[in-house]
């Protein structure tokens, strides 16, 4: 089309503004058609195209008349001749049945020559002649003449490259395109030519796509836009918004081409919009019948196959079968058509006919080296499995020739069925399959399948064997350390695991990049797993990041990154409700850590209100119901901490209306227990407590929370029932069972402290330390209880126990724990060891950042300074001023409410 020449023509004369306006007026008549889907018919479609062309022709004819009038008034204006030539060529391209009438084309060429007679040295006029001429020699001469006049004219180089490419001179075309692009990078044609020569230039599909995208962004021409979608099909960018927008605009400017409608169908299909894809394929077939003339049978077959596939995916299996019958009647039913034929019968429940088509497919594709033979084998395996079960599917696999396993697709299907094979019939096949593995991606895919097999085969009826899968993937990760698939699955299993610390190390499985957040059906993205792991970690710190009090050493440095990543994902894909849901849960964890400040509560309430209005949560699917349940519990939690008990109870009761298993509803009743406890409604509290015992849960945290409530409000005298329920919920846990029992003993010890029963508390904590010997926090708690008992009973034996536990807490912690050395110093001093007291006190001082040292530490340093001689090296290395008075004054300054400090000051001043 002559529209390529407009860039050069716009630069000349006063008529350029009229020219631009008339051409834009022509293009603004974009095509619109309302008869989509099954309602599309040939007459209405043809009428809409002809009406659109008529509008365009009227606009161009009006432009021609205007230019001719301008030429009549100013025949000495050379640029007007070129404008008339361009308008005449555009009118010729839009008119119907004008192939034998050469007058319009002759007029356009003649007008170009008229402009050159007046201004023979105008390089742009020579470019216009080259674009409008139909003779290759004249075109080449015109472009070369333009370059002789202006060697830096990018448009001449670009169209010369286009001419060389049409003539098959690929090297000359590349040189011309490169020269044009170096002169003017903002010109679209060289970028388009670079993408078209991708094979000759050894460009990757992604690089070719980027080049064509650059051309479309510079000048959104319909030819460029359809070329962009073709490259998107090759490079995997069909789902991108750029491809969708390009094909939408291309259809508005070139609706008469079947290819445009077919490409739009492919784009819609990639975006899972199958109804729109069906409508586009129907229009493509109509355009092929009406406007494409004699279209090849293969092109018509491609459109029909695409239509059949979309009908099948859209759930219209009956219509898909009719299309298959149409293809069969025309002799166009190929291997892909047979696959769709069998799939459509299977979707309708006609299994005998589906198997019959599968046999036809096997006889057509397998005996020969057909390109779709591997796809056919994998399809037949899956179809037989779904219809006849895994036994017949395995029997079919065992009958396959050995060369069939050379395809990666077949190997993947065989591995998937083997993962469900408890009789091990396919062990020999799978072991031989390993011989054909050539890429790390395929090795990772087979490891993925092997992991799923371990989960299923070694698990029970209601529970997968997660630990077996974790152990296998850890070994596989050593072989393929860069496999994103293995890392993602390992992280997912670690988050799902109930073993101690598995959740905490899940973040180390992958490096998360929000820009690569592309979800695939049935596979969790790394961002989702990372966000879920941050919530499941239950890592509630002290709010002071400089203190090493967090029980999670792995995720503590990643807390702030999680929310930022999820915010980026929500910003990139606002329709991604799952990322939004994880963002709410992570904000709740952050609010819990900071003791629910007012600003975070406001943010949470707003986020939850927006999330609950989503249409996703109106569905009856278990995943949607569970997410809505969690959001309602979040809303209830925020309301509880804001003092709005009425809204808390309302949200918790709304959560109980969800159709979920009892072990989930347990937590709504647990939240109601807390709400009634705040209101001092003991009858409601006891009722909800009994309901929790009846429903039960398989989550240890739920039972621990209920244990706190039971002890605080004396809800039940029989303590064994809850302890038995706690032990019952974790039978499948193996390696970390002792740790969970230790946590339960810790809870019992804490409740005993609340009741003033320190001996019972010491026994519970001692048992916890025996079960979980590597946990420094447990030894710290035991040491504190022993020191309190020693103070009350003046018993040196408990002091010795305290010293032993505090030393173990100190040794087992990778980072200095606060107060451990201080308590150890006090215990050593009570036993009369002043040197150890001094040593531990100085260690405690060094472990604290200067800005958050507690008052008690300054007070202890005051005692140390009084015992030591003034200017002692031990203290002078820590602080320039070692005066006991300065130490006590700093302690009072930090905590002026402590009478002990004031009494020490008065005693010092005496």
Image (cartoon, helix red, strand yellow):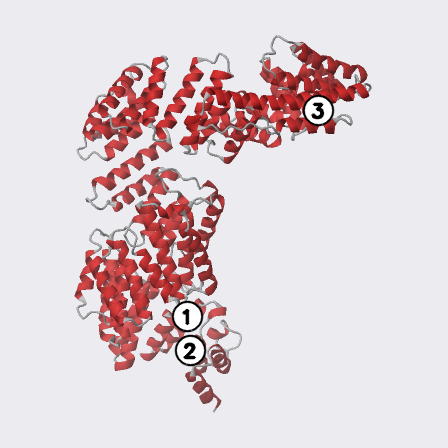
- Is disc 3 surrounded by few (<14), some (14 to 19) or many (20+) residues within 10 Å? some
Above or below 441: residue 825: below
Residue 875, position in %: x, y? Answer: 47, 74
Residue situated in front as seen by the camera: 20 or 245: 20
Query: Between disc 2 and disc 1, whose residue precedes?
Result: 1
Which numbered tag is attached to residue 844?
1
Task: Determine which quarter of the picture holds residue 366.
Answer: top left
* C-alpha span from label 2 to label 3: 87 Å
Query: Between disc 1 and disc 3, whose residue precedes?
Result: 3
Name the residue carrying label 3.
Answer: 8
Task: Determine which quarter of the picture holds residue 436.
Answer: top left
Q: Is residue 436 visible?
A: no
Secondary structure at badge 3 equals helix
Which numbered tag is attached to residue 860?
2
2 or 3: mark nearer the eye: 3
Query: Between disc 2 and disc 3, whose residue precedes?
Result: 3
Residue situated in front as seen by the camera: 374 or 602: 602
Residue 818, position in %: x, y? Answer: 39, 68
**Which residue: 18% across, 35% down?**
422
């Amino acid at each position: 089309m002559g529209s390529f020449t407009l860039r050069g023509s716009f630069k000349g004369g006063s008529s350029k503004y009229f020219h631009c306006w008339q051409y834009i007026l022509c293009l603004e008549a974009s095509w619109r058609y309302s008869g989509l889907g099954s309602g599309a018919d040939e007459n209405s479609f043809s009428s809409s195209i002809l009406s659109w062309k008529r509008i365009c022709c009227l606009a161009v004819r009006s432009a021609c008349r205007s230019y001719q009038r301008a030429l009549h008034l100013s025949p000495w204006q050379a640029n007007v001749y070129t404008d008339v030539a361009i308008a005449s060529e555009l009118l010729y391209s839009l008119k119907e049945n004008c192939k034998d009438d050469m007058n319009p084309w002759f007029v356009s060429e003649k007008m170009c020559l008229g402009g050159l007679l007046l201004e023979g040295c105008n390089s742009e006029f020579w470019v216009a002649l080259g674009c409008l001429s139909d003779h290759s020699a004249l075109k080449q001469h015109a472009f070369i003449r333009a370059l002789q006049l202006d060697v830096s004219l990018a448009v001449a180089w670009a169209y010369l490259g286009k001419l060389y490419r049409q003539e098959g001179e690929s090297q000359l075309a590349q040189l011309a395109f490169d020269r044009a692009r170096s002169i003017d990078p903002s010109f679209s044609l060289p970028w388009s030519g670079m993408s078209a020569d991708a094979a000759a230039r050894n460009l990757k599909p992604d690089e070719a796509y980027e080049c064509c995208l650059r051309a479309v962004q510079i000048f959104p021409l319909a030819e460029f836009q359809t070329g962009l979608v073709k490259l998107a099909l090759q490079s995997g960018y069909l789902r991108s918004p750029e491809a969708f927008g390009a094909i939408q605009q291309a259809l508005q400017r070139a609706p008469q081409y079947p290819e445009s409608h077919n490409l739009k169908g492919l784009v819609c299909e990639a975006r899972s919009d199958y109804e729109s894809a069906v409508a586009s394929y129907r229009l493509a077939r109509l355009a092929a019948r009406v406007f494409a003339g004699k279209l090849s049978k293969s092109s018509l077959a491609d459109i029909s196959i695409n239509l059949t596939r979309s009908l099948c995916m859209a759930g219209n299996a009956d219509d898909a079968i009719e299309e298959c019958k149409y293809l069969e009647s025309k002799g166009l039913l190929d291997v892909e058509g047979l696959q769709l034929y069998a799939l459509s019968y299977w979707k309708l429940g006609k299994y005998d006919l589906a198997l019959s088509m599968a046999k036809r497919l096997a006889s057509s594709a397998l005996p020969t080296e057909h390109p779709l033979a591997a796809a056919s084998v994998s399809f037949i395996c899956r179809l037989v499995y779904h219809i006849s079960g895994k036994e017949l599917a395995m029997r079919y696999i065992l009958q396959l020739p050995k060369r069939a396993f050379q395809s990666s697709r077949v190997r993947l299907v065989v591995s998937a069925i083997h993962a469900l094979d408890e009789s091990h019939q396919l062990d020999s096949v799978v072991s031989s399959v390993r011989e054909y593995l050539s890429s790390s991606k395929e090795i990772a895919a087979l490891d993925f399948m092997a992991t799923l097999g371990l989960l299923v085969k070694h698990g029970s009826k209601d529970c997968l064997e997660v630990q077996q899968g974790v152990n296998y993937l850890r070994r596989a990760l050593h072989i393929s350390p860069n496999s994103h698939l293995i890392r993602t699955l390992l992280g997912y299993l670690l988050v799902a695991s109930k073993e101690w610390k598995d959740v905490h190390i899940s973040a180390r499985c992958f490096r998360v990049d929000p820009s690569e957040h592309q979800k695939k059906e049935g596979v969790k993205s790394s961002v989702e797993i990372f966000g879920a792991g941050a919530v499941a970690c239950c890592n509630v710190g002290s709010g002071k990041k400089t203190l090493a009090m967090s029980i999670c050493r792995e995720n503590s440095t990643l807390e702030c990154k999680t929310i930022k990543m999820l915010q980026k994902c929500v910003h990139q894909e606002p329709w991604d409700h799952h990322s939004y849901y994880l963002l709410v849960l992570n904000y709740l964890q952050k609010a819990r850590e900071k003791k629910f400040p007012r600003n975070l509560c406001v943010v949470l309430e707003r986020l939850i209100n927006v999330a609950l209005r989503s249409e996703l949560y109106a569905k009856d699917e278990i995943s949607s119901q569970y997410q809505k349940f969690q959001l309602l519990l979040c809303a209830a939690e925020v309301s509880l901490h804001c003092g709005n008990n009425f809204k808390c109870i309302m949200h918790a009761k709304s959560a109980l209306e969800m159709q979920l298993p009892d072990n989930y509803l347990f937590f709504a009743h647990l939240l109601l227990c807390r709400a009634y406890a705040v209101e001092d409604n003991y009858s409601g509290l006891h009722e909800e407590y009994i309901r929790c015992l009846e429903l039960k849960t398989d989550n240890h945290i739920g039972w621990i929370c209920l244990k706190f409530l039971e002890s605080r409000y004396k809800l039940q005298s029989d303590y064994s029932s809850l302890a038995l329920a706690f032990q019952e919920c974790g039978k499948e846990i193996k390696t970390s069972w002792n740790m969970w029992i230790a946590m339960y003993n810790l809870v019992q010890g804490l409740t005993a402290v609340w009741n003033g029963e320190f001996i019972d508390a010491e026994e519970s904590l001692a048992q916890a330390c025996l079960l979980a010997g590597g946990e420094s926090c447990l030894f710290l708690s035991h040491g504190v209880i022993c020191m309190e008992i020693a103070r009350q009973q003046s018993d040196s034996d408990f002091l010795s126990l305290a010293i032993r536990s505090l030393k173990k807490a100190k040794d087992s912690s990778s980072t200095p724990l606060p107060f451990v050395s201080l308590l150890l110093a006090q215990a050593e001093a009570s036993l009369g060891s002043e040197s150890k007291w001094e040593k531990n006190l100085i260690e405690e001082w060094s472990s604290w950042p200067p800005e958050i040292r507690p008052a008690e530490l300054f007070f202890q340093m005051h005692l140390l300074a009084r015992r030591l001689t003034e200017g002692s090296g031990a203290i002078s290395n820590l602080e320039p001023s070692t005066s006991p008075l300065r130490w006590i004054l700093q302690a009072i300054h930090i905590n002026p409410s402590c009478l002990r400090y004031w009494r020490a000051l008065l005693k010092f001043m005496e």
